[in-house]
Amino acid sequence: MLMMVRPIFSILLSLRHNHLHHQRTHSILKSMSNDVISSEGTLPPKRIFCYGDSLTAGTAPPIYDLFPYGQSLESELGDGVVVRWRGLPGWTAQTMVEYLDDGNVGLRAAVNGIDNPPISLVIILAGTNDIGFLTSSMTSTGGATDIDDAVKPIVNLHKACLDITKGEHKIRTLAVGIPGSAWQQMNSSASKLAADMNSSIQQFAQSYPDGVVSYTDFPFPYEKNDLWCSDGLHLSPEGYKRLGNDLAPIVKQILERCN
């Protein structure tokens, strides 16, 4: 069983350099800069940027198309909110940090590049691939990973957004907890690491005043049902839609606090 699941993460790593995925997700971001900002007598839209790995891109193997949760999130939020996204299949949070300022895939570069109005909220869903790489060589009970080291890249993604200055404007972030997976069900080390990382990310969010950083658990568990793909890792098209719908009430509360 172990050898059947481990290749998932090797396959995802190779997808990191897939130009097609980068091109398609980049176009979704680029369109944000071309949105109509406002018309006379109306307020400019609040902008949300979703960033992460294949779970943000909307990968649903073996289906070729992408089903980003940002689509259903925007639909649920209604008029006055624009949602865009960039998902990097196979990328760990550590690699995302290394490419923060890359003009094609970097989080900081993306957030810095959007103005009039700037982004109000960045939603970060990352860590699934980190768990895969950190635990794929472990036995089901052996070995241990330093939680602070494991969480640091995710924390640094949030800090990169919070450190951006846009005049009086304050950028907020929302951390979505690492979801379950078939790998975590099979490997107790992976399951424990995911739980410990989510707890640490939540503590990080709570350390910021006024809800500048928020945390929410992933809205639903991993189960063998129509919300998940048969690979035991990705959401199905219906799962991505459900994710966006479930995040919408949380995002609405955050946007009410945005300046």
Image (spheres, rainbow, N blue to C red):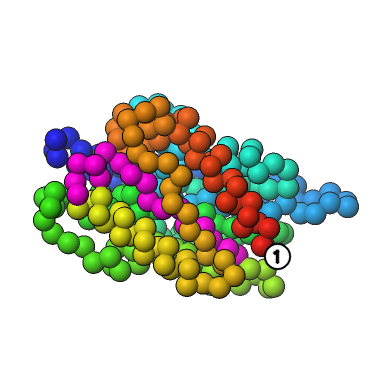
223, above or below 95, in the image: above
Residue at image mark 1: 259
Whether residue 18 appears in magenta in the rendering, the answer is: no
Q: Is residue 118 visible?
A: no
Where in the figure is residue 11, as x and y percent of width and height?
A: 26, 39
Q: On the picture, is 188 further left or further right than 225?
A: left
Picture residue at 25% right of the left edge, 54% below the top: 192
Horizontal side, residue 193 vs residue 105: left or right: left
Image point 70% across, 65% down: which residue?
Answer: 259
Where is residue 138 drawn, in percent x and y?
A: 13, 52
**Mark 1: few/some/many CA within 10 Å (<14, 14-19, 20+):** few
Q: Amino acid at mark 1?
A: Asn
The secondary element bearing badge 1 is classed as loop
Quarter holding the N terminus is: top left
Q: Is residue 227 left or right of residue 36?
A: left
Q: Position of residue 221 (x, y in %)?
A: 37, 41
At 28% from the left edge and 65% from the top edge, which residue is drawn? 147
Q: How many marks?
A: 1
Residue 81 vs residue 217, the one in the foreground:
217
Q: Quadrant of residue 110?
A: bottom right
Is residue 258 at all visible to an observer of this figure?
Answer: yes
Residue 127 falls in image quadrant: bottom left
User: x, y (%) of residue 109?
Assistant: 52, 61
The residue that appears at 25% across and 50% down in the rendered structure is 191
Residues in magenta, as a range:
171-188
Q: Residue 178 colored magenta?
A: yes
Image height check: is 223 above or below 32? above
Which quadrant of the view contains residue 239? top left
- Residue lying farthest right? 41
